[in-house]
């Protein structure tokens, strides 16, 4: 299968359609194989992947790690508290050090928007940077696994109605999904509390609506976002209000299309943005998203490695 060369994965914006199709097709293949590849198909044989997670993570960090293992790589995990950044080393110097040790793949989560892109510019030609979530900017591998999960159930994105609910303003998952799903042909309606909505969306196929009910009515996909309490800063959200007006309850879900599916990138705040009976219910794709994340991340590694084959 042919595709445009991609050196880093920094954003879900403007990914070439051939690359998206390649990722879907390879994710499907890896899923069929349960992620067990013959030795000569492991694209990262003899490579080292470094996980640099400057913010907490369970599913992204572990699934990138497992995906790297399945692709034949060894994995090194760097955490801020035990690295030499505590002695004043910059992250650029940390990457240069790891490059000198032969590491070429850097999976980076950072609280500052744009930091993986900045590090990619300075990391040298041989380094591949994968953005595992940067501040409130983007989380491209999450959007890709979300889109794959939607495609498994809905087959086509053309005209698909996607409701995105909650903490939109600070959500890198929302931003990446809006770019990717719009490019694929879906129509996104977003809704959230006034303080957590942007003034406008920078995708033509996205609209902001006032109420959660308006967003959910007739939707084929309902994507619920986590209330990001760790980013509160100047924005203070009344949890009781949030629950009353935006929590995805069984009653609210009734407004959606009868075949609607529910997505949430996790981690979930049960009883705040989503009712447990919906999160654990038959329409919930939450654990399927996690499962698909492993195969999508294997495909992402293969895509980045592909240009060198
Ligand atoms: N969806 C997501 O990014 O989850 P983690 O923070 O656990 O990686």
Image: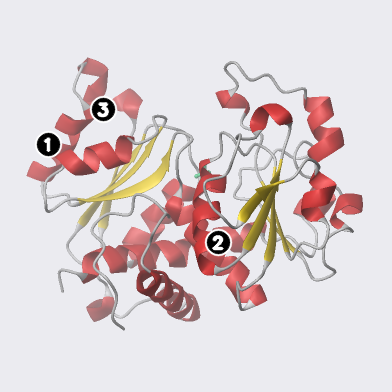
Q: Earlier in the sequence, mark 3 or mark 2?
A: 3
Rendered location of residue 278, percent (x, y) = 81, 53
Q: CA distance from mark 3 to mark 2?
A: 37 Å
Cβ(mark 1) to ligand 1 < 8 Å?
Answer: no
Rendered location of residue 18, percent (x, y) = 36, 74
Q: Looking at the image, which residue is at 22% across and 44% down?
A: 120
Number of other residues with Cα within 10 Å of mark 3, as a class: few under 14, some 14 to 19, many 20 or more: some
Q: Of the residues tagged 3 and 2, which is closer to the observer?
A: 2
Q: Looking at the image, which residue is at 68% across and 19% down?
A: 236
| Residue at the disc numbered 2 | 181
| Residue at the disc numbered 3 | 83
Q: CA distance from mark 1 to mark 3?
A: 12 Å
Query: Given contact means CB atoms under 8 Å apart, are the residues at marks 3 and 2 in contact?
Result: no
Residue 97's disc number: 1
**Screen quadrant of the C terminus:** bottom left
Q: Is residue 173 above or below residue 186?
A: above
Foreground residue, 241 or 71?
241
Rendered location of residue 52, percent (x, y) = 32, 39
Q: Of the residues tagged 1 and 3, which is closer to the observer?
A: 1
């Amino acid at each position: 299968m042919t595709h445009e060369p991609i050196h880093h994965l920094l954003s879900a914006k403007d990914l070439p359609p051939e690359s998206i199709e390649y990722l879907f097709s390879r994710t499907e293949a890896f899923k069929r194989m349960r992620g067990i590849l013959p030795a000569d198909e492991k694209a990262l044989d003899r490579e080292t992947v470094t996980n640099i997670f400057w913010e907490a993570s369970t599913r992204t960090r572990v699934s990138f790690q497992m995906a790297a293992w399945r692709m034949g790589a060894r994995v090194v995990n760097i955490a801020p508290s035990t690295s030499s950044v505590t002695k004043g080393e910059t992250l650029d110097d940390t990457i240069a050090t790891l490059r000198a040790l032969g590491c070429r793949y850097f999976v980076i989560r950072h609280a500052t928007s744009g930091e993986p892109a900045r590090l990619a510019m300075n990391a040298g030609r041989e380094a591949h940077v994968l953005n595992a979530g940067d501040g409130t900017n983007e989380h491209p591998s999450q959007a890709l696994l979300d889109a794959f999960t939607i495609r498994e159930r809905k087959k086509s994105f053309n005209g698909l109605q996607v409701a995105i609910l909650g903490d939109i303003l600070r959500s890198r998952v929302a931003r990446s999904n809006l770019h990717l799903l719009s490019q694929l042909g879906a129509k996104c309606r977003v809704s959230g509390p006034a303080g957590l909505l942007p003034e406008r969306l920078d995708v033509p196929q996205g609209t902001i609506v006032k109420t959660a009910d308006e967003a959910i009515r007739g939707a084929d996909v309902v994507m619920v976002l986590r209330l990001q309490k760790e980013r509160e800063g100047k924005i203070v959200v009344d949890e009781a209000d949030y629950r009353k007006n935006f929590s995805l309850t069984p009653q609210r879900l009734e407004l959606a299309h009868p075949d609607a599916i529910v997505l949430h990138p996790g981690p979930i705040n049960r009883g705040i943005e989503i009712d447990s009976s919906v999160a654990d219910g038959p329409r919930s794709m939450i654990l399927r998203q996690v499962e698909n994340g492993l195969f999508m991340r294997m495909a992402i590694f293969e895509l980045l490695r592909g240009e060198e084959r």
